[in-house]
């Protein structure tokens, strides 16, 4: 799994035709052939070959084989994805920029990228283009763009059943390198992983408030908070920092790439905490006994309920054939995270985004807050417009408030879970407003004209997304922190 796969390969086809065209032109001129010479050799009109060299036409395999023979090069060399020269790479970049939506929105005439443009002028134009793109990304980093990015990412994850084999393989290799044979991952083994990857750990009191950890790549140090909150697993921040390093993610170019990298990092960290092989064996045995439960997975690997629920969502469909959905909901009813591959109809806004929406009051994710027993999982069947679903929910308390974490599955596959015999049952007709969003008629008639509530409006709803390479992180604070804690030789 790569960030490109999570995002989609934008402009890939256009880039290939442009690179192919530049390679043909380079090889032709290198051999002293004119356009007419090459056209004659492949039995095509010069205008057709010109369009091919300019990246404006896709060629069939037979034509490319003829071109390769005429140029006396192997077909593989002709089809290489690398630009033939540095100058050609810049020309391709400028051509791509002119074909992009940002350039078109400027209303400027396109121009031919030819030899008459000096290398210096070409570099200047590309520099201006990059700066325009940067400013455009900052202006576009609104809550709407964030919601669109979340929607795209969730669609890709659904198509993969929330399972990424490449990241599972990464985790298996890392754990083998430190001799972890299975079972819970101790803090000592997590530290061994850091040492194996060339990092020393440093626990500090003054970690920047906007960060979970700070990695000093120059000096091979990872800074972590001293006396972490009991609500957080102290291994998670370390494993996420190591995962970012292992994956070699570049600085994110936009919010969509930032989210994709975050998903990869969190996934790999969870795969280290709950290794695939041991977890799958554990879950298969539980399925045979019809005793699947998130809390058993949590206890078997000594992780938080949320981590176990996430991991169950990763593995259940791929290895057990059970479609599932996952929800993390604030006590106010607001969705923070949501994934599904079982067609559970989450509430969405006009952009298709789920995050920030209110969950139906009848769902277990909301009902669990009314249960007196906060230590045991809550089970419920919910009859929804798309069918009946069984869900298990638990509450986790944090300094930011209480959250419910839920895993659900369609009625047909609930038979594999402990808690399937619950008598709790609700009916939800959401998104019909009459379900839970509209007050009962008698109360509305009594109070509609005599109430004026003052809304608690979150100011962030009106602001742009946090700017910077890593949204929400104070870069100045991070750099000052690294400067303060760098080894004496480098200060």
Image (cartoon, helix red, strand yellow):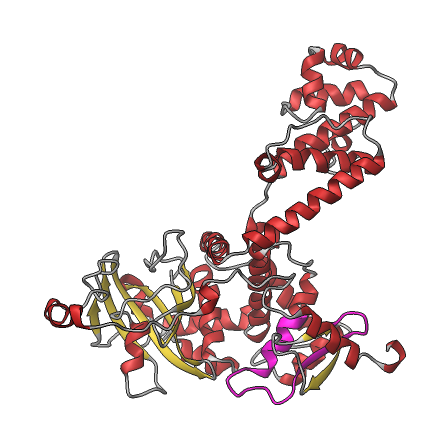
Asked which quadrant contains residue 396, the reply is bottom left
Asked which quadrant contains residue 222, the reply is bottom right
The x and y percentages for residue 409 are 33, 64
Read off the magenta span. Answer: 216-242
Q: Residue at x 39, y 53 (%)?
A: 352
Instruction: Name the image quarter holding the N terminus.
Output: bottom right
Instruction: Name the image quarter holding the C terminus.
Output: bottom right
Reply yes or no: does residue 233 show up in magenta.
Answer: yes
The x and y percentages for residue 119 are 84, 35
Asked which quadrant contains residue 289, the reply is bottom left
Residue found farthest to the right: 489
Q: Is residue 59 left or right of residue 124?
A: left
Decide if residue 290 is in sight here. no
The x and y percentages for residue 406 are 37, 72
Q: Residue at x 66, y 20 (%)?
A: 62
Q: Residue at x 54, y 61 (%)?
A: 465
């Amino acid at each position: 799994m790569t960030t490109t796969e999570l995002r989609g390969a934008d402009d890939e086809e256009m880039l290939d035709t442009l690179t192919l065209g530049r390679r043909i032109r380079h090889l032709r001129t290198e051999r002293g052939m004119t356009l007419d010479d090459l056209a004659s050799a492949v039995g095509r009109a010069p205008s057709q070959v010109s369009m091919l060299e300019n990246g404006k036409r896709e060629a069939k395999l037979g034509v490319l084989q003829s071109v390769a023979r005429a140029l006396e090069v192997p077909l593989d060399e002709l089809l290489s994805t690398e630009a033939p020269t540095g100058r050609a790479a810049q020309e391709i970049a400028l051509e791509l920029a002119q074909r992009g939506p940002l350039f078109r929105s400027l209303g400027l005439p396109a121009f031919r990228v030819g030899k008459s443009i000096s290398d210096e002028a070409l570099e200047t134009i590309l520099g201006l283009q990059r700066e325009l793109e940067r400013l455009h990304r900052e202006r576009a980093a609104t809550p709407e763009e964030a919601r669109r990015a979340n929607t795209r990412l969730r669609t890709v994850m659904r198509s993969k059943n929330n399972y990424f084999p490449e990241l599972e393989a990464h985790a298996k290799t890392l754990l083998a390198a430190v001799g972890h044979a299975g079972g819970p991952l101790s803090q000592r083994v997590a530290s061994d992983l850091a040492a194996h990857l060339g990092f020393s750990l440093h626990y500090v009191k003054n970690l920047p408030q906007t960060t979970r950890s700070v990695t000093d790549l120059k000096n091979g140090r990872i800074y972590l908070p001293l006396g972490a909150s009991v609500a957080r697993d102290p291994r998670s921040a370390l494993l996420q920092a190591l995962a970012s390093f292992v994956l070699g993610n570049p600085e994110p170019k936009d919010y969509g790439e930032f989210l994709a990298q975050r998903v990869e990092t969190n996934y790999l960290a969870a795969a280290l905490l709950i290794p695939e092989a041991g977890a799958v064996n554990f879950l298969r045995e539980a399925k045979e006994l019809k005793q699947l439960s998130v809390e058993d997975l949590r206890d078997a690997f000594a992780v938080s309920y949320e981590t176990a629920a996430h991991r169950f969502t990763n593995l259940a469909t791929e290895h057990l054939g059970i479609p599932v959905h996952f929800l993390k909901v604030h006590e106010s009813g607001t969705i923070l995270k949501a994934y599904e591959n079982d067609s559970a109809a989450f509430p969405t806004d006009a952009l298709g985004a789920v995050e920030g929406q209110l969950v139906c009051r009848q769902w277990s994710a909301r009902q669990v807050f009314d249960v007196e027993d906060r230590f045991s999982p809550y089970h419920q069947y919910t009859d929804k417009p798309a069918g009946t679903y069984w869900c298990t929910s638990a509450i986790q308390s944090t300094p930011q408030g209480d959250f419910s974490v839920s895993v659900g599955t369609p009625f047909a596959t609930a038979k594999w879970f402990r808690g399937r015999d619950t008598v709790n049952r609700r009916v939800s007709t959401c998104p019909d407003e009459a379900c839970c969003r509209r007050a009962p008629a008698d109360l509305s008639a009594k109070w509609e004209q005599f109430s004026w509530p003052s809304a608690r409006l979150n100011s962030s709803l009106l602001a742009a997304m946090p700017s910077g390479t890593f949204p929400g992180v104070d870069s100045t604070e991070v750099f000052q922190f690294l400067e303060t804690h760098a080894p004496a030789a480098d200060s």
